[in-house]
Amino acid sequence: MAIQSCPKCDGTMQEGFVLDLTQNAYRRAEWVEGAPEKSFWFGLKIRGRARRPITAWRCVLCGYIESYAKGP
């Protein structure tokens, strides 16, 4: 995705990602299809669901953030 202008203030958007800290490791957060369902052992059930890494764009002027989960 190309650099874009902020839809709120017309500032410059900077690419980044949403950080997830899991079991003392840094990971990139993911979008998971469907509503969250509790799992006794793992917190949430995600088996068989589509997952996509989240890319986030942050405005350097106002701080507005847009998130995208690209993929098929």
Image (cartoon, rainbow, N blue to C red):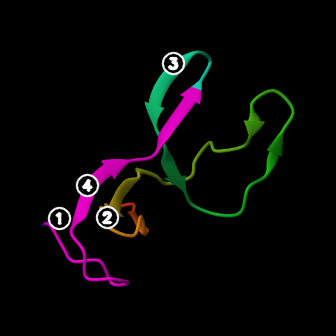
The residue pinned by badge 1 equals 1
Q: Amino acid at mark 1?
A: Met
Region rendered in magenta: 3-21
Residue drawn at 47 percent across, 25 percent down = 26
User: Helix, strand or loop at disc 4?
Assistant: strand
User: Helix, strand or loop at disc 1?
Assistant: loop
Q: CA distance from mark 1 to mark 4?
A: 9 Å
Please state the horizontal and vertical placement of residue 2, each as a whole percent of the image. Answer: 12, 67
Q: CA distance from mark 3 to mark 1?
A: 27 Å
Q: CA distance from mark 3 to mark 4?
A: 22 Å
Q: What is the residue that sits farthest to the front in this orientation?
A: 61
Q: CA distance from mark 2 to mark 4?
A: 21 Å
The residue pinned by badge 3 equals 25
Q: Amino acid at mark 4?
A: Glu
First of labels 2, 4 by sequence position: 4
Of labels 2 and 3, the one closer to you: 3
Residue drawn at 17 percent across, 64 percent down = 1
Of labels 2 and 4, the one closer to you: 4
Q: Is residue 37 above or below residue 71?
A: above
Residue 70 visible to the viewer: no
The residue pinned by badge 4 equals 15
| Res. 72 image quadrant | bottom left
Is residue 8 one of those drawn in magenta? yes
| Res. 5 image quadrant | bottom left
Q: CA distance from mark 2 to mark 3?
A: 28 Å
